[in-house]
Amino acid sequence: MAAGLPVYKEGEKMDSNRIMALVVVGILVAAAAGGVYLYMNDSDDYDLSVVYLNKSGYETQMVANEKGFFGDAGVKIKNMTVTGSGADTVNALLAGSADIAATGEGPVASAIKNHGDKIVVLCNVNASTGGQVWVAGPHITTDFVLYDKTAENTDEVLASWEGAKADLGRILKLGVQKGATTESALKSWLEFMGINYSDFDASPAEGDIVQLVNVSANELVSIFALDGEKRRELDMMAASQPYPSNALERIDGSVKVGDNSDNDGYGISCYITTKDIYEKKSEVIFKFLNALKLATDYMQNEANEDECVSICKNIIGASDATVRAVFDIGEFRVSWDDEISAKTLYNTAQSKGFTKITLNQCIGACPQEVKDHIEGMYA
C-alpha cells in the first residue's frame, strides 16, 4: 500500500468534517482504484485484505465486521473501502492492493471478459431484485406509467416515456455510471420496455428516447439536485440504493419510474479474487466464507434486523428506511447457484455485449471445491 495513505481504526466513528479532511489529504491510489481514494483499518496483522464500497449492497461485510464474525471464524481481515463503483474494487484487486473484492455482477462480468479464468468468484451473498432504481426529476411534468406485471403494460410505459420526450422537446438525459452493475440492469429494463436509447457518447438515432450520460454513482444525487444548466441537463438518474432513495428524499417532486424487479432482473453481491491469490490462500478463504455464513445467518433472523439496520445505516450514513428496504428484499445467503447467481452474471455479460462469455463459464467461475465447501456449511 502506498506510503502515507490515510487510515482510521476500524469501527471508529468519524464526523463529516473528519471524513472530508481525509479525502482532502488522502493519497490518490490511481493504479489500485482507477482514481479513487482508498481507506483501510490500521492493522498490519491480517490474513486477507478485502476491498468494498461504503454503500448499500455491502451490508454483509459491515455486519460481519461489527459483530466480530471474522474473528469467530478464525480469520483476520484488513477492511478497505473505495468510493465510486464496484469496478473500483475490482481495479484494487487486480492492482494487487487487496486479496478479495466485493462488487456487483457488472464489474465481475467485465473482469471475466478482460481476464478470463484468472478471475475466481468465491460466492454471492445477496441475490435481490428491486435494488436498482430509476428516478425522474421534478422538471418533467409528464406522468410516467409504472410497469404492472399483471397487466403487462409495456406499451403504456413506453408511451409515457415518449410523452416525456415530446414535452421536453428533446431526448431524455439519463445519468448512470458506465461500467457499474446499474448500467446493465438499466439497459435490460429499457430493452424490455421497448425504449430505444443512445449509448454513452453515441449520436442519437431516429426514434431514440433516452441518451445515457456517464456520471459516477457517488456524484449522481448532488448533480441531479442542481438547477438548470448546472445539472448537465440530467432529466433522470439510475443507481443502486441508497442513491435513489437519497434523491427522492432530497429533491421535491422527483419520482421513481421503475426498477429492475419489473423485468425480474436480479442483482448479486459477489466476492471475487484472482486465481493466484486463491491458490495461495485457499485455507483462510474458506474461513472467510465461514464468517460470511455467520453474518448472513444473523442477518436473516428477523429478531436481529433492527440491530443490523442500525449498524449499516450508521456506517453508510443512510436513512433507516433506505437500509431497511434492502433487508426487505435481500436474500442473505452464501451461494453460487446456476439459476440465480451464474445466470444473473451471464445475462449481465450478454447485456454488456460480452457475447463470448458462456453460461457454463459463469457457473465454473466459482471452483467446485468452493461450492462443495459452501454446500457443506449448510448441510
Image (cartoon, grey):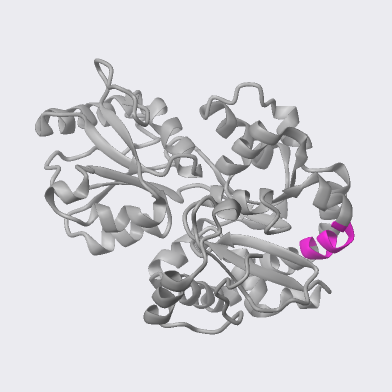
**Magenta includes 287?**
yes
- Between 66 and 231, the one nearer to me in the picture: 231
**Magenta includes 16?**
no
Left or right: 173 in relation to 301? left
Seen at 59% across and 76% down, the residue is: 303
Seen at 14% across and 53% down, the residue is: 227
- Between 260 and 4, the one nearer to me in the picture: 4
Left or right: 188 in relation to 356? left
Give the main secondary structure of the magenta stretch: helix
Q: Quadrant of the N terminus?
A: bottom right
Question: Quick check: 130 above or below 319?
Answer: above
Left or right: 128 in relation to 233? right
Q: Which residues are magenta?
A: 281-289
Q: Quadrant of the C terminus?
A: bottom right
Seen at 21% across and 31% down, the residue is: 160
Question: Quick check: 373 above or below 65?
Answer: above
Seen at 47% across and 55% down, the residue is: 84
Question: Quick check: 84 above or below 309?
Answer: above
* Quarter-of-image position of residue 115: top right
Q: Residue 350, image x and y in percent? A: 57, 26
Q: Residue 262, image x and y in percent? A: 42, 38
For the question of whether residue 317 can be seen, the reply is no
